[in-house]
Image (cartoon, coloured by chain):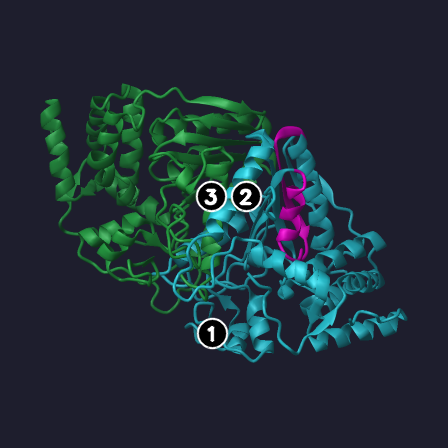
Chain colours: A green, B cyan
Amino acid sequence: MSAPSIPRSRTMVDADRLETLVGRIFESFGMPAEDARSTARGLVAADLRGHESHGVSNYLDVYYQPGLESGLINPRPQPRILHETETTARWDGDGGIGFVVAEMAMRDAIERARRHGVGFAAVANSRHYGMAQLYSRMAVDHGMIGISMTNGGALAVPFGGADPRLGTNPISVAVPCGEEPPFVLDMATTAAAMGKVLNAHRDGASIPTEWALGTSGVPTSDPQDAMDAARLLPLGSSATGGAHKGYGLAVVVEILSGVLSGTGFGQMLGPDNLGHFLGAIRVDAFIPLAGFTAMMDALVRELRATPPAQGSSGVLVAGDPEHIAEADRRANGVPLHPRVVEMLRGYAERLEVPFDLVR
Amino acid sequence: MSAPSIPRSRTMVDADRLETLVGRIFESFGMPAEDARSTARGLVAADLRGHESHGVSNYLDVYYQPGLESGLINPRPQPRILHETETTARWDGDGGIGFVVAEMAMRDAIERARRHGVGFAAVANSRHYGMAQLYSRMAVDHGMIGISMTNGGALAVPFGGADPRLGTNPISVAVPCGEEPPFVLDMATTAAAMGKVLNAHRDGASIPTEWALGTSGVPTSDPQDAMDAARLLPLGSSATGGAHKGYGLAVVVEILSGVLSGTGFGQMLGPDNLGHFLGAIRVDAFIPLAGFTAMMDALVRELRATPPAQGSSGVLVAGDPEHIAEADRRANGVPLHPRVVEMLRGYAERLEVPFDLVR
C-alpha cells in the first residue's frame, strides 16, 4: 500500500497552518471564531485524507464566501431541536453551514447513544457539510459505529431517467477497530462524485463512460460535457451493471436526509438547502467492545490478505487509502493546486496575516 | 409499467394453495406447524414478488430438507436474547431457519422502536432467511422504516481480490408511503445475486461480464463458469465503475450482521451459520407520519415522472416491479418451472395430500 500519487503541479503546504489561515478566512466572512475553526478543520481534514474534492480547493471563494456574505448561508446559526424522543432528534439547522450544524447534531446523537444504545439525528435547513465521514468518524472514539449521509442539489439521474433528480447522496459508515485504523466507508451513491469530474477537467483528463451522461443523453468521456449535463449515473452505471441498486441507495439517502428531516427534495428545496441523517450505534449495546474490535481487526486483515486479481495491486479496506494519505500528508504536507495557493495568498494579504503555509 | 415477462415454460400455480402445501412439507421435515407455515409464507412471498431466486424453487429439496433432517438447521429452535438494552438486542438463533429466527427478532425490534423510537437486532447462529425484504417490510405497517441485512457464504470477491471472501450480503430498506405502495429496496451488494446466475444457467442464457469472474480469474459471460468460480463482483464491477463502493457496502453488511452479532465471518463461520442485522425506525419519532407519507408519495411520483433516457421504458422506484408482480400473480397465479412443479407433486404424493396447485 502506498500513498496516492500526487500531480507534480501541486504545492506542499503545512496542514496546521493551513487550518489556522482558513479559520481566519471564515471568521472574516462573519462566523464566530470557534465555528470558523471547526469549518476549517473539516475542510483541511478532507485535504489530509486525499479527498481534495471536499477540501479547501473547490468551494471557498466561489461558494462559501458569497454564500456567507449574502446570508444564503447563515454565518451565526442557532440550530435547534424541533422534535425529539430519547433516541431521536429532528433539527432545524437555521441555515448554518453544514460543518457546524452537523457536528452539533452528531454530538447529540452520540450522547443519546451513550444513554440509550443508539441515537439518530435528522437535520433540516442545513448547508454543504463537506465530506460525510467527518461526522461518522466522530462516533468511533466513543466505541460506536457512526453513520452519516446527506442529500444535495440534483446532479444525478434516476436509473432509466434522462434528467437529474437526485444529489450524489453520499453514505459514510465508520466502525472502530482495535489495533487497525477504523473502517471508514465514504461513498457517493453515483458511480463517481462530481468532484472527480471537476478534477479530471482541471487536469485535462478524460472520464470513464460509466460516470455520466452527456448533454446528448448518452454516456460521455468528456468532463466538460459531463459538467454541462449534470447527469451523473448511479453506482452500477447500466442495466446490466445493476444501476437500479445505486439509484435505490440514493433514494434511501434522500428519504432519510430529505423526507425524514422535513427538508424536502428536488424542486422543493430552496437554494442550497440540504438535509442530513446522522447516527451512532453503541457497540457494547450489542456485544463487549474488546471482542468486537478484535474481530474487526481479524476481518480487515483477512480481507487485505486476499490474493490479488489480475492487474490488481492488492486488496484494501475502506478507510485504508485515507489513513495512508493522512499519515503521509501530516508528515510531508498537503498538496494544493497552485491556483488554490494563490487564492489563499490573496486572502492572507487582505486580512493582513502572514502567509506561511508553503513548506 | 408492466409485469415482468414470464418464460413460456412456466406452470401457473395458486399462491395460497402453494403456501399450504409448502407449509405441510416443512412440517414433515420436523418443524412446528406455525413455524413451517411462516417459512412457507416467506418463500411464496418471494415467488409472488418476482424473486424466484429466493422462492420455493431453488432450495427446498437440495438445502432445506437435508439441512432440517440432518440438524444442520434446527427444526425446533429456541432463539434467545444474549444481551439487550432498551433499543438493542443481540440474539442467538439456536441454529433455526432464518425465516423463523429473523421474524422473531424483527418483531422485537419493532416493539423496541414503538417504545423508544428505534429498535435494532443483531442475530447470530441463524440460517438462510430468504429475501431480505421479508423483515424490512414488517416495519412499514407500524409507521416505521424497516432495515434488514444478512451475511452469507463466501461467493463474492473483495474489490481487487481473486478469491471469494464475502457473501452477496443483501441490504433491504422499506419505507411507508401514503397512497403509493411502500418504497422497498432489496439489493445484493454484488452486481448481481448468485440466483440470477443460476436462473441464466437454467434458461441457457449468457450473463453480463459485469457480474462475475470466471475460474481463470477474469470476467466471464458463461454462467457455468461463474457458478464454478463463485467469484461474484461487487456492485460497480470494475475500478472505473466504482467497485470499491459495492465492496465497501458488503463489508458494512458483514460488520453489522457478522461482527456485531458475534457470528463471525468467512472461514470462522460453521456450516451455513449466518448472522442478520434488523432495524426499525419509528417515523413519528422524527416527524408526524401523515406529513412524511405525503412527502414520500410526492417523491416517488416525481421520480417516476422523470423523462426516460434513450432506450429506457421509464423510471421506476424500488418496490414497483415487485408490487406489480405481486398484484399480477395473486390474480393470475405464480409461475413455477416444470421441474419445481414435479418436485412438489412428489412431496404431495409422499405426504398423501391432494395436489391441487395448478390453475
- Amino acid on which disc 1 is placed: Gly
Determine whether A276 is above or below A296 in the image.
Answer: above
Chain of the residue on which disc 1 is drawn: B
Quadrant that contains the N terminus of chain B: bottom right
| Near-viewer residue (A144 or A127) | A127
User: Within 10 angstroms of label 2, few (less than 14), some, or many (20 or more) residues?
Assistant: some
Q: Which residue is mark 2?
A: B297
Q: Which residue is mark 1?
A: B214
Q: Residue at x 35, y 54 (%)?
A: A232
Gap between marks 2 and 3 measured at Cα: 16 Å
- Amino acid on which disc 2 is placed: Asp
Measuring from the top left, give residue B325's x and y in whole percent. 63, 61
Measuring from the top left, give residue A85's x and y in whole percent. 58, 25
Residue at the right extreme of this rendering: B352
Q: Is residue A218 left or right of residue A13?
A: right
Residue A253 got which mark?
3
Residue B40 got which mark?
none
Per the rendered image, the range of residues in magenta is B115-142
As for residue A163 lying within the magenta part, the answer is no
